[in-house]
Amino acid sequence: MARVNRFPKMAALQKFRALKLGYDEKTAEAIGIAEALKYAIFKNLSKYRRGIEREKEKPEKKELYEKLDWETFKTFQLAAKDGLPFVGGKVETPEDYRKAVFGKFGEDVGKRIEEWAHRIIEATPREYLGDERKFFNYVWKPHRDDPIEY
């Protein structure tokens, strides 16, 4: 048996975090996948930092970043474009979430991932949900390696 990796688990946790903070289902799914991507990028950031900084300085990229909405998903420290999260140069959608959580593992395992995430978020104090650092340290770190087998 193989285990579900961290990426879909992070996406599901972030979806249920967003739901508990009052976002609708589709927006929560988009936030979930965007947050998982953001964390993956941050994990590898030191390798790519100089390249990212050079990209942001290109006139067309700089103009794009200046036009993004930084208030809609402020709690998640995500930019928004057209009402959806914008990470890594693209808008993230509920369909992207479905591919990451259900597409690779199938409906049954996807449901188990979501049930796992829902249980954790329901037991999480609200103060941790609205704080990126507390969420990472008190929710993600203790549960990121919980086994979900398929």
Image: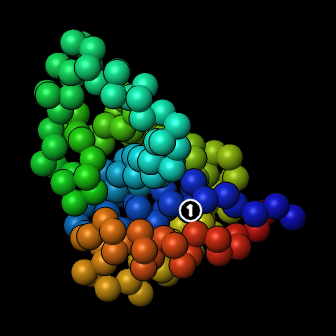
Q: Can residue 98 be seen in this view?
A: no
Query: Up-down: is 49 above or below 4?
Result: above
Residue 150 at x, y percent in the picture: 78, 63
Query: Up-down: is 120 above or below 78?
Result: below
Residue 63 at x, y percent in the picture: 17, 19
Colour approach in the figure = rainbow
Looking at the rendered structure, the kind of residue marked 1 is Lys
Query: Up-down: is 41 above or below 133?
Result: above
Residue located 41% across and 69% down the image: 136
Local crowd at mark 1 within 10 Å, few (<14), some, or many (≥20)?
many
Q: What element carries label 1?
A: helix
Residue 34 at x, y percent in the picture: 40, 46
Residue, far top:
59
Residue indicated by mark 1: 9
Viewed as shown, does residue 34 lie left or right of 47? left
Residue located 34% across and 21% down the image: 54
Residue, far right:
1
Residue located 26% across and 20% down the image: 57
Task: Please name whichever residue, 58 or 16, is drawn nearer the observer in this view of the structure.
Answer: 58
Quarter holding the N terminus is: bottom right
Residue 84 at x, y percent in the picture: 27, 41
Task: Please name whichever residue, 56 or 27, is drawn nearer the observer in this view of the structure.
Answer: 56
Viewed as shown, does residue 105 lie left or right of 41? right
Query: Up-down: is 126 above or below 107?
Result: below
Residue located 56% across and 62% down the image: 9
Task: Please name whichever residue, 43 or 127, is drawn nearer the observer in this view of the structure.
Answer: 43
